[in-house]
Image (tube, rainbow, N blue to C red):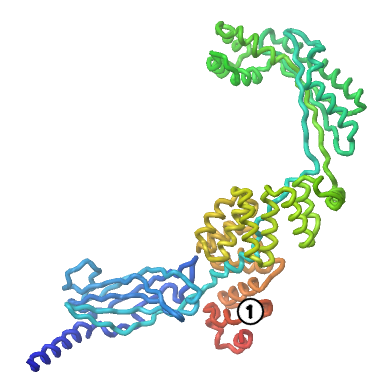
Amino acid sequence: MKKVSLLLILSAVLVLGSCSSKMKEMRQDFFTVTPEVLEVTGNEVPVTIDGKFPAKFFDRKSVLTITPVLKYDGGEAIAEPSIFQGENVRGNDKTISYDNGGNFRMKMTFDYIPAMEKAELYLRFSVNKGNKSKTLPEVKVADGCISTSQLYQQTVATANIAWCDDAFQRVIKQAKEANILFLIQQTNLRMSELKKSEIKEFNNTLSDIAKDYENKVLDDVQISSYASPDGDMNLNDNLATGRGDNAAKFVKKEMKKAKLEGYVDNDYTAEDWEGFKELVAKSELPDKELILRVLSMYNDPEEREAQIKNISSVYKELADEILPKLRRARITLNYQLIGRSDTQIKEQYKADPQVLSIEEILYSSMLTEEIKEIEEILNTAIKLYPADHRAYNNLGVLAYNRGDYNTAASYFAKAANADNASPEVKINQGYLNLMEGNTADAESNITTGASAKAGNEALGNLYIAQGMYGRATSQLANSKTNSAALAYLLNKDYSKARGIIEEIENPDATTHYIKAVLGARTANIAFVYDGLKEAIKLDPTLAQKAANDLEFRKYTQDQTFQSIVK
């Protein structure tokens, strides 16, 4: 029995040996990896592996499983394996010819984590023949990962996040309107019309403007006079003109009483078909749709009038309800409200801010460059107008800009509670999501708030985080920021990236680091060393990053590089 058992064991070893004898010599040159050095796109590491099995290599009865593994300090990420089979194997996997060999392609993505910044891509091989299996030595095929795209989490820190503007207007256009109605075929002003409340309000407004000349300024008075579209055209022309002239005389008389000077403009419309159409459309006349159809079918005024008069069932109601309202003169008083000057707003804020409107208080926060003073004004706005979201948002912006992201998040949450539809608040919450690497919530918030003035820049940053660099550059085309420089760098438009870097007004450590990367990609040694020196001077933690950054792999043995990052 022992002899038989030993014989079986030896036979198994021979079989296993024969199953892998032709496939154990996996070499690195069997495989081509794209990109040669792995690079993070969005939050993933995409990889394409093209392989070639040489002729007389793949055993006809074997099945080969290739598993890509990205190894990094503290762990590894395993991609979906690919399976290949010999010609004599019955199965559904890709068949490789023994005589001719064969090519193959594997595509995969790894979810990126920061530890992968220094990683290596290996292929694991497992051969099966019948009931026997054997593991072949792993083969390293690529290094990784270039993580320049992840700099977006630093560039968003200096992005122009969304400030809620005030709606303060120093000059506000105002219009006061009144109508004087006339009897059919008459142009005289009736006392009953001149005693109407709207005429009294018109006269009172004239007096107010005259008395409050510092805060109210008259532009002009416009008079538009009309005749109803029934009757002879010449008659209606005279009626409309006469009504306008009499209305103008009345207005000039009242302006003289108020001791107010100004221009009175007078025009007329002989037959008010537009007004007729509007009143009919708003009415409850039984045949109004028929009347409106007649108006659309006939352009000639006389033909229109004749056709409408033929609708005998409704003409009396037209004569009683619609036409009298068209015999009128409309008086429009145009003037300006002049608000407080900057000095007056400042003085009033110091004396008693409760007198100021929310718009004036928010505007006053823009009249100083002192951050503490701005914060004090915004807190006053919250105290006096707690339901308005803008002061909360703007305090959040100030906190964000000084790097206090927890406080910023708290203020943005309060702003959203006051107005959950504010596009500015949505964008700012999206920026916080980007800083956390949470692109899903960032997309929801930023796309919702894209209508804000800061929307294009926010979308650009979102697209960088998602790996859509072409889209990012289109949104950031007019921006001179770290985000724009990074977008063009990642999109391989190095000339544009350089131009933006040179135009950034206040370059910071991230600006200089992007410059160094640009130098490495364009073989500009001066950019590499100058960029790294300035970046590390402003942020010493970047020395370790640069030492491990595969963007600088060609320079790591250089003494100048080593002296900079030591």
Q: Residue at x 68, y 59 (%)?
A: 397
- In the rendered structure, the answer to whether residue 125 lies left or right of residue 307 reads left
Nearer-the-camera pick, 48 or 45: 45
Quarter occupied by residue 227? top right
Nearer-the-camera pick, 219 or 528: 219
* Amino acid on which disc 1 is placed: Leu
- In the rendered structure, the answer to whether residue 248 lies left or right of residue 450 reads right
| Residue 512 location (% of width, % of height) | 65, 74
Quarter occupied by residue 252? top right
Residue indicated by mark 1:
532
| Residue 128 location (% of width, % of height) | 22, 78
Position above or below: 450 against 160: above
Which of the image's four quarters has the N terminus?
A: bottom left
Nearer-the-camera pick, 81 or 104: 81
Q: Residue at x 58, y 82 (%)?
A: 544
Secondary structure found at label 1: helix
| Residue 318 location (% of width, % of height) | 62, 11
Position above or below: 265 against 562: above
